[in-house]
Amino acid sequence: MPAIGKSLFEGVDLQCETNNTAHRTEEIRVDQLIVRRGQPFTLTLNLTEGFNKTTPLFINVATGGEFATQEQGTMYLLAVPDLVEQSPEAKAVWKVELDAKSSTQTGNLILTFTPPADAPIGLYKMVASYKDEKMSLAELTVLFNPWCAEDSVFLDDEKKRQEYVMNEHGKIFIGSADFIFSRDWDYGQFDESMVSICMNLLDRNLKHKKDPADDVAARCDPIYVGRVVSAMINSEDDNGVLEGQWETPYDGGKAPTHWTGSISILKQWQKNEFQPVKYGQCWVYAGVMCSVMRLLGIPCRTVTNFSSACDENQNLIIDKYHSEDGVDKRISEDSVWNFHVWLEGWMRRPDLSEDSRYDGWQVLDPTPQGESEGIYCCGPAAKEAILKGDTDLKYDVSFVYAEVNADCVDWLVKSDGSLEKIEADQKRVGKKISTKAVGSDEREDVTDEYKYKEGTKKERSAFMRACTTLEDHLREKNKLAAVNILAETAAGNLTIIETENEPRSLNEVSVKILNGTTEETDAETLPPPPKVTMRFEEVSKPENGQDVSLNLVLSSESTADRPLSISISIQAMKYNGKLGETIKTEKKKETLLPEKELSIPILVPFSVYREPMLDFDSMKISALVKDIENPDHPYLAEDNVVLLDPPITITISGDVRLNIPTEAEVVFKNPVNETLKDCSLTVSGSGLWRDEYFVKLGDMLPSTQFRVKLPVHPYKVGQKTAMVDFDSSVFRDIKASSTVTVKK
């Protein structure tokens, strides 16, 4: 017997390194126990006396503190040997086994625990009771487990698990459908601070504040967790991680284009007592959410939708307005973004069907574009539901469906304020939907997973289904007319024959459905002339700092000469479609000859676009063409030109060894004939720098080059990516990266 006053418990070995390695969490840290549900882990408990099996060892496992209950699955009572009669209402049944290698005579107990595959994720406490004494056995974190077949996030492909859970580095695609670029993003989900940050994030959501017991219990479900994380990444409702800003100046924070990864943002949020970090835009929101989801164990990936619709009035039609000089002046509630980045998370959807048809990738979007059930979040929207047009399903399928498959209608705003329809376009929205390929940095096109091929019967059938399932919702908002309009538009049967003086949207335009035929109101009405087709051609790659040169090429099947009036406008544009200053306008009269192409040169000198484009993402080039002899049939062509940044490089040469200091070299040459002021560098990269490393460079004279060497302190082994951001008065946030392998 132990001496009087001596504890029955000698100590416990949590075997953190062994357990974490088995659970694929050792990259986070090995001094804390971090396990995945549905998978066993082992610890050793040493008593100061022999263990008598007639006197059970009780172990209470709980999450949620004082609110934990067996009925909600947040607490469970274990016993060795198992002599406990559990409540029939107990959920989330844990298991414990006494390993055969244990020495009961000496009190050396090797205990193997298995969290259930449906356990709520989060921080747990294990308290052991033996005879009349208690001991805090362990504090541990339980995560989702995509390696466990019983877990609702199970992904049956090791290469995909390595990419979508374990990979700390990614590519996010930006630009436009015709100018696609990739941006390196450091997810860094296995940074040692991430468990603390993510648990704090879950505990600060509005649902937790309202009912902490229900919130913690609901964390067994990745559907619920996905919605919570989507809401918490933005700051609209709940002091979440990121505050959005789509306009300059970015006072009190950093421009969204500055960021190269998630960790510096998440650390700043925690360090500043959970006040929102300034500032984010869609790719930043998505990148940060991807980091949190991967840490929690939900397979996920960022996805970019080029020509992404924002359908504010929820009628699956995007209205765009153009003045007669080609300049897009009229404000519309709707918009088409050059690109929009969201997230896909992998999970089962038993809430939608019993046959697993909606399982798999789900769209989650933390960018605060609108409320979902009263909170700024979006999804999870089953990708299969988006493809089929099942817009009545939760969550937010109709919103995402519009982003990838809304129809566009272009309107000419005449001088008297009336509208003339230019064209209806079923193919403009939802192009080249992109994600990083598994195991490489290549772009994978996943458009076919969101929509059937444009113009096919399947695609139009899905569109009609989407319209039909939205009908009840739209009727409640007095938008039934819009449903009829878009249904006919889908079938190609809509003809505008009359307009009001100042309509504000398609719903206010007087229309008549003609069932595929044109109703003749005048016996002498002539058919329209053959269409003038237009396209833009690059003369050279559009580079920031150089003149931009394009050709507008026109052609027609007409057999007669076509005198044309051509209005060209060039405007600065944000990636979300918001227009800035008009850079240049031109008006010309040219004649299009039969069976000939007409080429109109367009030149935009750097000196002309330098100031207007400083804080904008692309040039919107519009050409409005009218047949002088048939002016009632205008033609429109548009192009979004994204400028290539001048080159910058970062390299780390030689062998890179763990915990041995080395250097990175950054090289950049000023390509323009003016001084770059307020130049600075920021370097970052998980495993190479623990925090962003900032260097102020001063001014750069024309045509000069700098070579800057920066200290590197590798602290993790494996393949790591060094990233650099260069900022100045002329070139904003130019980026480069290089990959190195850190060896022991």
Image: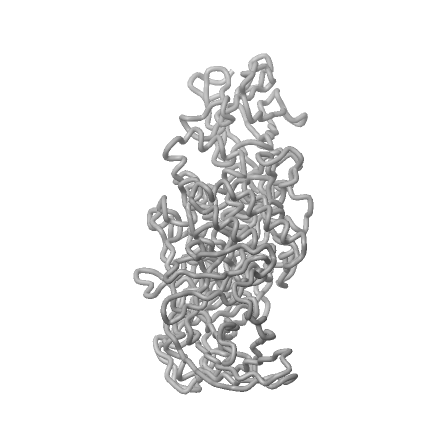
157 vs 105: above or below: below
Please report the residue visible at 48 percent of the width from the left and 50 percent of the height from the top: 482
Considering every residue shown, the one lying at the far front of the view is 523
Considering every residue shown, the one lying at the far top of the view is 54
Q: Position of residue 742 (x, y in %)?
A: 58, 61
341 vs 147: above or below: below
Q: How many marks do you count on the picture?
A: 0
Residue 23's quadrant in the figure? top right
For the C terminus, the quadrant is bottom right
Q: Position of residue 109 (x, y in %)?
A: 59, 26
Q: Nearer the viewer, residue 154 or 472?
A: 472
Color scheme of the displayed model: one colour
Q: Position of residue 516 (x, y in %)?
A: 61, 57
Q: Position of residue 322 (x, y in %)?
A: 43, 69
Q: Nearer the viewer, residue 512 or 483?
A: 512
Q: Is residue 255 left or right of residue 480?
A: left
724 vs 402: above or below: below
Q: Nearer the viewer, residue 429 or 574?
A: 429
The reply to whether residue 189 is visible in this rendering is no
The reply to whether residue 2 is visible in this rendering is yes
